[in-house]
Image: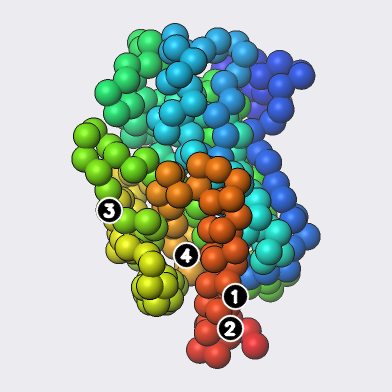
Amino acid sequence: MVLDSAADTTLLLEAAEVPPVLEENTAGRSAFLLTCDHYGRLIPRALGDLGLPAGELTRHIAWDIGIAGVAEQLSNHLGAHLIAQRYSRLVIDCNRPPVAPSSIPRISEATTIPGNEGLAREAVEMRRQTIFDPYHRHIQGVIDARLREGMPTVLVSLHSFTPVYAGIARPWHIGTLYQRDTKLPPLLLRLLRTEADLVVGDNEPYAVSDETDYTIPVHAEARGLMNSGIEIRQDLIEDQAGQKQWADRLARIFTEIEATLRAQQLLPA
Ligand SMILES: [Zn+2]
């Protein structure tokens, strides 16, 4: 079966269903471009509930709990363009190379995903063409346009992590995630560590790699853009008060980072 790219959306998403890409502050002039791969937990109606009980579809395995509220408010505070993805990572993970086994996970943490078992190549391809490709094409197009306009672009990829994974409690409140950028992550780490109340992870609870990540390696590293991932512990941002507090804190820190990068002539004055 050959999927026509013009028709792909109608194959998996009905007309009334929202597109995968959500944006805020598209005209924002901030140097920071925010992405949020695990923003939402929608499932295309055609895929039902993936064979999972409702309780599983609101857990961390389905999305990054709390990050949507942080991302939107941080975008507003900074005047930064936010590009987010509305569908659950159980449908297709937008931060995994499509060749990775965890792209469409058959097991997440200890939960088997019946709707992801034994998928035909066409079914895999349809999820990719409906959700993964439009999201990443859009990020690429936005970066292309910014670079054409000579607009400074620093990619910040926003995530949240579960406080307990496979029975192990995680001590960090926030972590920076990076691989090849040597400019932004150390600066971000230094400023986060001046916040006396925080336990800060340096490439914890995850590190970025080409095998396990997509957004940072492809959109930032391959294009030579400064970048960092951020992971916030989900129990700190599960309610609106926590989301506001973290958006405020990160806005303050990124404003200081921007000034420092300008002083270091890593961004235009
Ligand atoms: Zn995530």
Tag 3 residue: 171
Residue positioned 50% across, 54% down in the render: 157
Q: Where is residue 105 in the image (x, y as percent from the top left)?
A: 36, 25
Q: Comparing marks 1 and 4, which lies closer to the viewer?
A: 1
Can residue 82 be seen by looking at this rendering?
A: no
Q: Do the residues labelled 4 and 3 touch (CB within 8 Å)?
A: no
- The answer to which of marks 2 and 4 sits earlier in the sequence is 4
Mark 1 neighbour class, 10 Å CA radius: few under 14, some 14 to 19, many 20 or more: some
Residue positioned 54% across, 66% down in the render: 249
Mark 4 neighbour class, 10 Å CA radius: few under 14, some 14 to 19, many 20 or more: many
Q: Is residue 109 left or right of residue 152?
A: left
Distance between the alpha carbons at the discs numbered 1 and 4: 15 Å
Tag 4 residue: 227
Q: Does the residue labelled 4 lie within 8 Å of ligand 1?
A: no
- The answer to which of marks 1 and 4 sits earlier in the sequence is 4
Residue positioned 43% across, 20% down in the render: 56
Tag 2 residue: 259
**The disc labelled 3 sits on which kind of residue?**
Pro
**The disc labelled 2 sits on which kind of residue?**
Ala
- The answer to which of marks 2 and 3 sits earlier in the sequence is 3
Q: Where is residue 212 in the image (x, y as percent from the top left)?
A: 33, 44
**The disc labelled 4 sits on which kind of residue?**
Asn
Distance between the alpha carbons at the discs numbered 3 and 1: 27 Å
